[in-house]
Image (tube, rainbow, N blue to C red):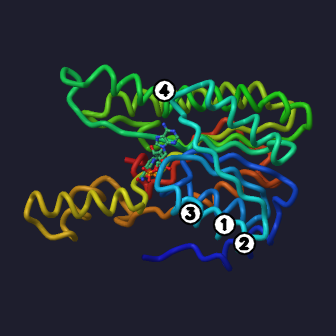
């Protein structure tokens, strides 16, 4: 797959443009979150990783990111469905880095079912992790950003923050809500150097998506290529997956001073999906 390279991204932003900044990226033990955390670290920011997974693998990722980018990288396993855990993660990040300049709410889960059968507990969990966690994270960090006159809030929403699909009631509601929250925070922070933006990806190539392709190919007895073309990329006009590197590059740009006037935006990175 054609990917944005480190050299290309370095040539756009210069190296270490975020030196002296520190960031929390939720849900960064996998997929898009790792891509964003890696790009911020490469730009020189200290990063707190967060999420679930095999502790040895997470430690390997953390140590590699720290060493390769010569920045402080920490890990916190706070559960984004628990407001108190989010506040404690912020306290630990403050203690470790001294300040927090950038927060990326990326942790997310999905459940697909018709509305009449949608389990209420899944609805509650999706709203808590995909939407309310972003509110709690902003609430715990906004004050210090405003006081210092610089802050970057990035919420990873989805094309489903802009348009709907059937059977994804909780996810679509949460992601639309996240876009709304982003706009409010943008207005409140506008005069104080704090920007808030939502990234709205279409299908992104992550281990999760790769697994789903294999599963669907097996269960429908069709080739991987036709699952990719006819199911996953049906609505994505470019007929290619976005990459986690693209999410990382956009995040670094949004954190730059060049992006100071971009706030309250819901930016589609969906290969033209929402242009339909
Ligand atoms: P992923 O499943 O690979 O990663 C999700 C991350 O969230 C993991 O690190 C996981 O440990 C963490 N997480 C899950 N529940 C958590 C909880 N309660 N507390 C803390 N961490 C938790 O998913 P991904 O594809 O990288 O998606 C990341 C974000 O991007 C999600 O918000 C998702 O909705 C959004 N998104 C993804 C795609 C895509 O095609 N992959 C498209 C649009 C939007």
Residue 132's spot in the image, x, y percent? 55, 26
Q: Closer to us: mark 3 or mark 1?
A: 1
Q: Are marks 4 and 1 in contact (CB under 8 Å)?
A: no
Residue behind mark 3? 246
Would you identify the image quadrant in which residue 18 lies?
bottom right
Cα–Cα span, label 3 and label 1: 23 Å
Q: Are marks 2 and 1 in contact (CB under 8 Å)?
A: yes
Cα–Cα span, label 4 and label 3: 27 Å
**In the rendered view, would you say 97 is above or below 117?**
below
Q: Closer to us: mark 4 or mark 1?
A: 1
Q: Residue furthest bottom?
A: 7
Q: Nearer the viewer, residue 194 or 30?
A: 30
Q: Closer to us: mark 4 or mark 3?
A: 4
Question: Regarding mark 4 in the picture, which secondary structure is present there?
Answer: helix
Relative horizontal placement of residue 145, taking residue 78 as reference (left or right):
right
Q: Residue at x 16, y 63 (%)?
A: 217
Relative horizontal placement of residue 199, taking residue 222 as reference (left or right):
right
Q: Residue at x 55, y 32 (%)?
A: 179
Picture quarter with the N terminus = bottom left
Residue behind mark 2? 67
Question: What's the mark number on residue 63?
Answer: 1
Residue behind mark 4? 128
Q: Residue at x 83, y 48 (%)?
A: 97
Cα–Cα span, label 3 and label 2: 22 Å
**In the rendered view, would you say 217 is above or below 2?**
above
Question: Regarding mark 2 in the picture, which secondary structure is present there?
Answer: helix
**In the rendered view, would you say 226 is above or below 125?**
below
Would you identify the image quadrant in which residue 160 lies?
top left
* Whether the residue under disc 4 has CB within 8 Å of ligand 1: yes
Residue 110's spot in the image, x, y percent? 36, 39
């Amino acid at each position: 797959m054609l990917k944005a390279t480190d050299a290309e991204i370095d040539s756009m932003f210069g190296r270490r443009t975020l030196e002296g900044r520190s960031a929390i990226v939720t849900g960064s033990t996998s997929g898009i979150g790792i891509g964003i955390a890696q790009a911020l670290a490469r730009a020189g920011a200290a990063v707190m990783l967060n999420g679930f997974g095999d502790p040895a693998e997470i430690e390997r990722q953390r140590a590699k990111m720290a060493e390769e980018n010569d920045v402080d990288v920490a890990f916190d396993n706070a559960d984004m469905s628990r407001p108190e855990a989010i506040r404690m993660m912020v306290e630990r990040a403050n203690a470790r880095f001294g300040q927090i300049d950038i927060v990326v709410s990326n942790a997310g889960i999905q459940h697909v079912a018709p509305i009449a059968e949608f389990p209420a507990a899944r609805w509650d969990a999706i709203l808590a992790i995909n939407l309310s966690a972003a509110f709690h994270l902003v609430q715990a960090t906004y004050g210090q950003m405003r006081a210092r006159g610089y802050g970057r809030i990035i919420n990873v929403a989805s094309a489903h923050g802009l348009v709907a699909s059937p059977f994804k009631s909780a996810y679509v509601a949460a992601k639309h809500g996240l876009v709304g929250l982003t706009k409010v925070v943008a207005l409140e922070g506008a005069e104080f150097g704090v920007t808030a933006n939502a990234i709205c990806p279409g299908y992104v190539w992550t281990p999760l998506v790769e697994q789903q392709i294999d599963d669907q190919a097996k269960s429908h007895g069709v080739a991987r290529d036709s699952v990719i073309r006819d199911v996953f990329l049906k609505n994505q006009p470019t007929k290619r997956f976005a990459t986690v590197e693209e999410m990382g590059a956009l995040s670094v740009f949004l954190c730059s001073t060049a992006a100071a006037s971009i706030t309250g935006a819901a930016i589609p990175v969906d290969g033209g999906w929402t242009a339909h």
